[in-house]
Image (cartoon, grey):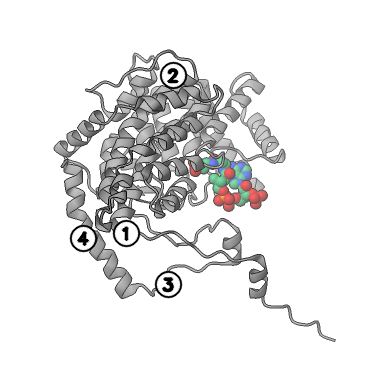
Amino acid sequence: MSALQKRLAEIIPGLREEVKGITKNHGDIKISDVTIAQAYGGMRGVKGMICDTSVVNPDSGLVIRGIPLNELTGKLPEEIFYLLLTGEMPDKTAMKGLQKEYSERAKVPKYVWDVLEAMPKDSHPMVMLDTAILVMEKESEFRKEYDKGMKKEDYWKPTLEDSLNILAKMPVIAAGIYRMRFKKGNRIAPKKDLDWGANYAHMLGIKDKSGNFAKLCQLYLTLHCDHEGGNVSAFSAHTVGSALSDAYYSLSAGLNGLAGPLHGLANQECLSWILDVLQQFKGVPSDEELYKFSWDTLNSGRVIPGYGHAVLRVTDPRFTAFLEFGKKYIPEDPVFQLVAKVYDVVPKVLKEQGKVKDPWPNVDAGSGALLYHYGLTEFPYYTVLFAVSRAMGILAQLVLNRALGTPITRPKSVSTAWIKKQIPSAPAPQQ
Ligand code: CMX
């Protein structure tokens, strides 16, 4: 048993006791009210589920296990996955153990490549990634053990096995998709001595003598790892997983949600918008030109991708981390310069329009420009990078939910006819 499995086996009984005690002794305490507007409005702000891996504070952004994101930007994704699961940073032995697990489990079954190669040549890279994960479902240790009659308190163990198997293979599959879909040549095999993020950069085959692309990959994988439990991808995976569908079904479902333009696909949309601006103005426009272009986007009924958030009400610290990376490594790049300029102009435009609750940039506003600089110019691929990282949070949440025996998700829906009955009738007009 590796250090991670061992540590979880030590922690989980205490977590179960804690949750049992809270629900038994304080289960009646009310934590949320729901208005009609919230019921029609995507349940925004309704507190109705638990997620211990991370919290998103409207006024400061992502906090992972009590640590603000800006204190974690230098960490390796392996450390982050350990932290998400256990609430602790791994020591050297635990880290090495996890890296060894990834390395031993990285071999992708041949049928995955056969399926990917049989897909239409113009399939979206996210469709390819989600298909690859789903087609591997037959490998699920959870399903095998469940079919054998495993005890409920053991559910988390094969779920962790499935999660490690998926995470080990994901960069290999994701890089393979990049090379296949964009005709970059043969797949590149992983190297045993590289960490998870550096290996992904290596397998993508992006030429970069400076080594900064590998640093960007590490940062990218760390920043996108988790964003509490209610976002579309995490919540979809949670709901599917709550039916005891295994990690392959759950993650694939969650990532299908990530592929939506209002969620993870916004990074591809965002770069496309930035490049449109550059093309229209034949370079970085003036503030006035950008101001007008932004208003034109809004007036044509479209959103400005990369701006706004369902929970955040400040600049996303993940955007800040990317901005700092750009300022340090590629300050002269015109696409990056435009991203920085958009940050000066667009919040003003969105505030003037007065509709958005959060006029500030989210994670997707800056990441594409950095990838583009290093030669990863195929922006339909960007959400795949997001997905490889977000798999860590989704799978960590699934393991913990299995450990706690979280029941099947089943909120109550109501009809508009029922809603109308809740509305007090207006007093009769006075004669
Ligand atoms: N540009 C233009 N209009 C925007 C906007 C933007 N960037 N962000 C929000 N709005 C609009 C909404 O469409 C909504 O308009 P209607 O009232 O006409 O429907 C209004 O402002 C109020 O929306 P909100 O309460 O501020 O935002 P929501 O919680 O409904 O939506 C989000 C959040 C992210 C979907 C939205 O801000 C958006 O569409 N942003 C652009 C896409 C994007 O960057 N998505 C990535 C988010 C991060 C991620 O999950 O990956």
Helix, strand or loop status at disc 3: loop
Q: Is residue 323 visible?
A: no
Whichever of callouts 4 and 3 sits on the residue coming sooner in the sequence is 4
Q: Nearer the viewer, mark 3 or mark 2?
A: 2
**Lower sequence index among marks 2 and 4:** 4
Tell me the quarter of the picture where residue 151 sits.
Answer: bottom left
Tell which residue pokes out farthest to the bottom in this image. Answer: 431
Type of the residue with mark 1 = Gly
Residue 197 pos. (x, y %) = 32, 29
Could you classify mark 3 by the number of other residues whose Cα lies within 10 Å: few (under 14), some (14-19), or many (20 or more)? few
**Residue type pointed to by label 2:** Arg
Pointer 2: residues within 10 angstroms few (<14), some, or many (20+)?
some
Q: Quadrant of residue 184?
A: top left
The quadrant the N terminus occupies is top left
Q: Which residue is mark 4?
A: 14
Viewer-proximal residue, 277 or 224? 224
Determine which quarter of the picture holds residue 386.
top left
CA distance for labels 4 and 1: 14 Å
Which mark is first along the chain, 3 or 1?
3
Residue 362 placed where, x, y %? 49, 41
Q: Residues within 10 Å of mark 4 (few under 14, many from 20)?
A: few
Which comes before the other along the chain, label 4 or label 1? Answer: 4
Q: Which residue is mark 1?
A: 405
Q: Residue furthest front?
A: 148
Q: Are marks 4 and 3 in contact (CB under 8 Å)?
A: no
Q: Do the numbered discs 3 and 2 sit on residues whose CB atoms are within 8 Å? A: no
| Callout 4 secondary element | helix
- Determine which residue is flagged by label 3: 30
Q: Nearer the viewer, residue 7 or 117?
A: 117
Q: For this rendering, which residue is in front, 148 or 125?
A: 148
